Image (spheres, helix red, strand yellow):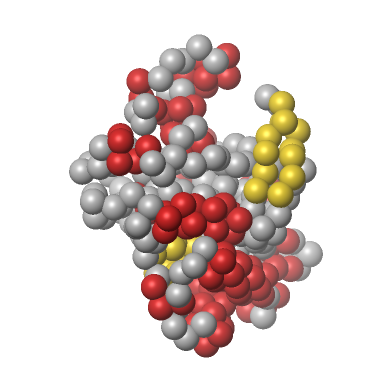
Amino acid sequence: GFNPQTKAKGNFTDRWWAQIYGSNLRETFPGDYEQPLPQAGLTEQQLAKYSTPLYGWLCHRSGSASMYWGDTSTAALNLACSGATAKTDIDAGKPGVDFATGTSSSASGSVAIKGQAGQLQDFATTVRARGDAIDQILLSIGGNDIQFDTIVTECVTKYIETNLTSCAGDPKSMLNQQYAKGQGLTEITNAVITSGDNIVAAMRAAGYPDNSYTIQLASYPIGVPAAAAVEQQFSNFPKRQDYCGMGLNNADLDLITGGFKDLMRQRSIEGATTLAKRYPEVGVKVLDASDALKSHELCSDAITY
């Protein structure tokens, strides 16, 4: 069946997750278990003909991901993998936007890995053989290529453990090294171009003309506010970390939400512009999501507490 909410919860990991977080893995990340997911207007029988193998380890494919929004008469498939870069990392079990294949060892055994472009080619071929078509591909790439999670981890560690110091004030911090005074983050542009090249190659191999679909590139939203927009009661340590989970110095907040965010957006647009020139018949568009979380950020003064 295609209803992850009704499946058995006997797996030990699922039971542990339910006890700690109030939900099991199938309910939290249904896309890691089966796809396409049930959608209003489409029967299980209609979706079943597009049932597809899943690849990757702990990809965290949410049932509320943006590719499921909108027209309920269409089916969506989520190939994205949390933690993945443009290039597949077989050892980590993270399929990138390429054609790599292999096997990764995980806590639950061997996991088959196949790059997202390879998965796209397989799925697009199946869809076309059944008389349907893929008309839009949503791409979000680059954040892991610049190791944004590691950047934030370093800044939080500085704030909590080293006398509330900042990354912004340390020329050797990863935040400053990647930002490079507004000249860095080129890995994002490269990731967008490489991923786009592989998407086009996959669609061509599946028999799709360039003018038959669009690639929608989403820039990255930032989930923290500028220092001036932090709720007053969370202005000092330790409340900022303990009560709303945002252990970042004011200087770091301003750099991350200011020049760093703007440069991430700029590098994404640069990659999309290159793709649009390289593949003029493919509708390459940019979905600017950089302010998508505005007024909903951690510790924001726009939220009622």
Q: How many marks?
A: 0
Residue 87 visible in image: yes
Judge from the rendering whether residue 1 lies leftward or rightward of residue 264; answer left or right: left
- Position in image of residue 260 (x %, y %): 57, 69
- Position in image of residue 299 (x %, y %): 42, 48
Q: Image height check: is 25 above or below 291?
A: above
* Residue drawn at the location 68% of the way across and 34% of the way down: 111
Judge from the rendering whether residue 179 lies leftward or rightward of residue 18; answer left or right: right
* Residue drawn at the location 30% of the way across and 34% of the way down: 44
Q: Image height check: is 97 above or below 281?
A: above
Question: For the view shown, which residue lies furthest in the left direction?
Answer: 41
- Viewer-proximal residue among 295 and 46: 46
Q: Image height check: is 59 above or below 26?
A: below
Q: Image height check: is 15 above or below 166?
A: above
Where the N terminus falls, by quadrant?
top left
- Position in image of residue 70 (x %, y %): 26, 55
- Viewer-proximal residue among 250 and 174: 174
- Position in image of residue 95 (x %, y %): 64, 50
Judge from the rendering whether residue 194 lies leftward or rightward of residue 298; answer left or right: right
Quadrant in which residue 16 is drawn: top right
* Residue drawn at the location 51% of the way across and 82% of the way down: 279
- Viewer-proximal residue among 183 and 154: 183
Where the C terminus falls, by quadrant?
top left
Judge from the rendering whether residue 158 lies leftward or rightward of residue 281; answer left or right: right
* Residue drawn at the location 66% of the way across and 58% of the way down: 99
Residue 37 visible in image: no
